[in-house]
Image: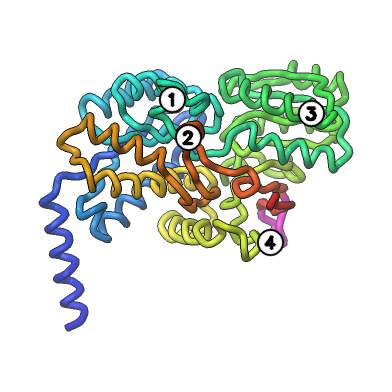
Amino acid sequence: MKRALIGLLALGLGLGLAQQAPLKIGVVVSATGPAASLGIPERNTLVLLEEQVNRRGGVAGRPVQFVIIDDASDTTQAVRATRRLIQEDQVLAIIGTTTTPASLGMIDPVAEAGVPKISMAANLEIVFPVDEKRRWVFKTPQTEQQMSQPIVRDMAASGVKTAAYIGFNDAYGEGWARAFEAAAREAGIQVVASERFARTDTSVAGQVLRILARNPDAVLIGGSGTAPVLPQRTLRERGYRGLIYQTHGVANPDFLRVGGDVLIGTRLPAGPVLVFDQLPPDFPNRQVATSYVQQYEARFGIGSYSTFGGHAFDAWAILRPALERTLRREQPSNLAAFRRALRDELEATRNVVGTHGIFNMSPTDHLGLRFNEAAVMVEIVRDSSGKLDWKLLRTFR
């Protein structure tokens, strides 16, 4: 009898949702191409969230529809997808995309149309300064400036006096070069070489030889996805024995799978969700991060989660309450007014606990994360079962 009643309630809920026009949210992710290892968990997370939200009654009694487009890790395709979502699908807001260059390229079309966007890429310039265009743009991942701090602190604690940098020859790599070199200079660490490589390069021998000629104590590789394996492998094959650091752009299972043993001992800053089960019991977002990982792995398999799916989870954690508040005073049928009101509500976000930290937006801060709650330092190790894994080295609270 109880099961029948629950079934009838669920059926009634479903019929009620079916009668409502969906709240359309555009999503652009890099599910194929060089950034696929980042974009796939983002897409998976949003598919999972859409199912959960609609099964539980939607948002304010309305179903939610994520209109998801793959930009193939290409900026031109990301911009084209953004225009389609705005003009043809008439979405209320956009989540995306995965990479820094494409996220920067999406700023103009969302600003021109007055559509709020939440990026899942790292670069500070996506949201700073908050000018007439960037007032429409928010983001969830930590910036290079925030993540340079744990790297430089770890280098200093390890006695590093000289360091080299090799990063992508695009906005992601350049942003990291500026942030790291400034932080290193402030800490008294001399950066003796600064090299670049393309995401699709198959050899970095020349760059690595120039780095080796300067004999640095440590090397930071500024890349994301699986491409940063190439310079790390080349450094080790050429005999480099110093410390190697990576950025939070590689915190995914595919990086470990592609790199293998050459990655052991690598250090990197990451969002706390990466080591959710190693966090202190009183860490502010341990509970949210643990719940997210359990839900993701129940759907996509044990060991499949990454920090990038967490960025998508956090985007929805911010967007959902903003949608609920906006629906109390505006209707989606007045699309331009609804988008403006939604932007204002996103900027009013306070104390939203996500998988990477606690978000508090303001008119001058469209990220809202504090470094000490949003970053931990980890090392790649081989665990007792023989599997490559992430080991928490320290938190910064």
Callout 1, which amino acid?
Arg
Label 2, on which residue? 366
Quarter where residue 42 is shown: top left
- Picture residue at 79% right of the left edge, 28% below the top: 186
Image quarter where the N terminus lies is bottom left
Upstream in sequence: badge 3 or badge 4 = 3
- Precedes in sequence: disc 1 or disc 2: 1
Q: Are marks 1 and 2 in contact (CB under 8 Å)?
A: yes
* First to last magenta residue range: 381-387
Kindly identify the amino acid type of the residue bearing the numbered disc 2. Answer: His
Which numbered disc, 3 or 4, marks the residue closer to the eye? 3
Cα–Cα gap, marks 3 and 1? 29 Å
Tell me if label 2 and label 4 are in contact, CB under 8 Å.
Answer: no
Work out how far the residue at label 3 is from the one at label 4, CA to CA, in angstroms. 41 Å
Q: What residue is pinned by disc 4?
A: 385
Viewer-nearest residue: 284 or 79:
284
| Secondary structure at numbered mark 1 | helix
Q: Is residue 5 above or below residue 212?
A: below
